[in-house]
């Protein structure tokens, strides 16, 4: 006899909805949500779905009505309260679309609070699509069980970013030109600099000399090395976030 399946099954679809959820409420889903549940997941009546709203938390719901292009879910109960996200921003110069989307996805999984696209002198691809980028972040958040979405800022020019930099936030500047590993040790920098933080990663061509000087001139900036090899911008972003998460985030 097959064992009674655990409820909810591990495979319960998990979706972000842009509306405040409440225990006991019913919610109608249409559009891409309905397409995903009906056509991709082939969901049936009574089956469980996890929902989170980025406002209050995560809920368990079940299907009460199946339509052709929409469905109704009843929210049974709250499973988690919205989490406190570690206070880390990722500032990343746009690179090729697929790789930039990849950064957004991985940064979301790794736990950032906010992503800020930064336009620099050597940014090849200033044409980012915020809607697409956000869709990647939402999908990653759904998959990795976040209960809070990272914020996504509009593209900002590097000089404007530096000019208005918050006094209380460290800016860890990933600088591949550091050759003195002692001076540029990220591990040591993390021990010395706690509190709100951001990581700045350049485009594939790196920062110009002028930009490098301007970033270093900011009192809150801490130049750090990610080792003796030159990393691609996407690798650098993921490596730096991981280091910060392990040292100052919620990985411990
Ligand atoms: N200057 C190079 C490569 C830039 S790599 C060139 O001329 O092509 C892209 C970005 O990744 C850099 O701007 C930097 O922020 C980050 N990065 C890459 N390797 C790094 C390393 N070893 N240490 C710190 N940051 C690094």
Image: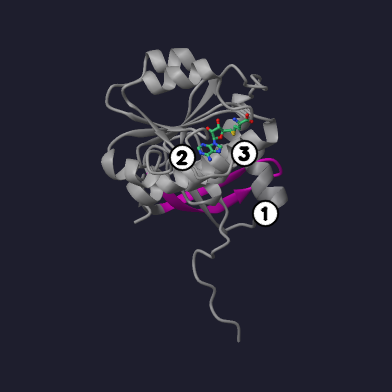
* Quarter of image, res 84: top left
Q: Is residue 157 visible?
A: no
Mark 3 is surrounded, within 10 Å at the Cα level, by few (under 14), some (14 to 19) or many (20 or more) other residues, namely some
* Residue 247 located left or right of residue 67: left
Helix, strand or loop at mark 1: loop
Q: Is residue 43 above or below residue 36?
A: below
Labels 3 and 1: the sequence-earlier one = 1
Picture coordinates of residue 24, whole percent (x, y)? 40, 48
Return the residue nearer the eye: 10 or 87: 87
Give the magenta part as a residue range: 57-76
Which residue is painted at 54% across and 64% down in the image? 10
Residue position marked by numbered label 3 in the rendering: 232
**Label annotation for residue 225:** 2
Q: CA distance from mark 3 to mark 1?
A: 36 Å
Name the magenta segment's main secondary structure: strand
Q: How many marks?
A: 3
């Amino acid at each position: 006899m097959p064992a009674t399946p655990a409820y909810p099954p591990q495979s319960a679809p998990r979706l972000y909805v842009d509306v405040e959820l409440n225990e006991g409420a019913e919610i109608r889903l249409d559009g891409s949500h309905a397409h995903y549940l009906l056509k991709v997941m082939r969901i049936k009546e009574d089956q469980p779905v996890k929902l989170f709203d980025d406002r209050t938390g995560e809920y368990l719901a079940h299907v009460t009505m199946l339509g052709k292009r929409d469905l109704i879910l009843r929210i049974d109960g709250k499973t988690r309260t919205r989490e406190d996200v570690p206070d880390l921003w990722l500032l990343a110069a746009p690179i090729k679309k697929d790789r930039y989307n990849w950064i957004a996805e991985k940064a979301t999984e790794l736990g950032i609070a906010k992503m800020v696209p930064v336009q620099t002198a050597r940014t090849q691809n200033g044409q980012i699509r915020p809607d697409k980028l956000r869709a990647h972040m939402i999908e990653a958040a759904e998959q990795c069980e976040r209960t809070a979405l990272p914020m996504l800022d509009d593209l900002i020019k590097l000089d404007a970013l530096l000019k208005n930099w918050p006094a209380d936030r460290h800016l860890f500047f990933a600088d591949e030109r550091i050759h003195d590993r002692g001076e540029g040790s990220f591990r040591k920098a993390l021990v010395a600099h706690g509190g709100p933080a951001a990581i700045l990663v350049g485009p594939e061509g790196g920062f110009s000399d002028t930009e490098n000087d301007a970033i270093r001139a900011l009192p809150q900036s801490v130049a750090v090395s990610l080792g003796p090899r030159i990393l691609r911008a996407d690798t650098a972003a993921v490596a730096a976030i991981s280091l910060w998460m392990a040292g100052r985030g919620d990985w411990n």
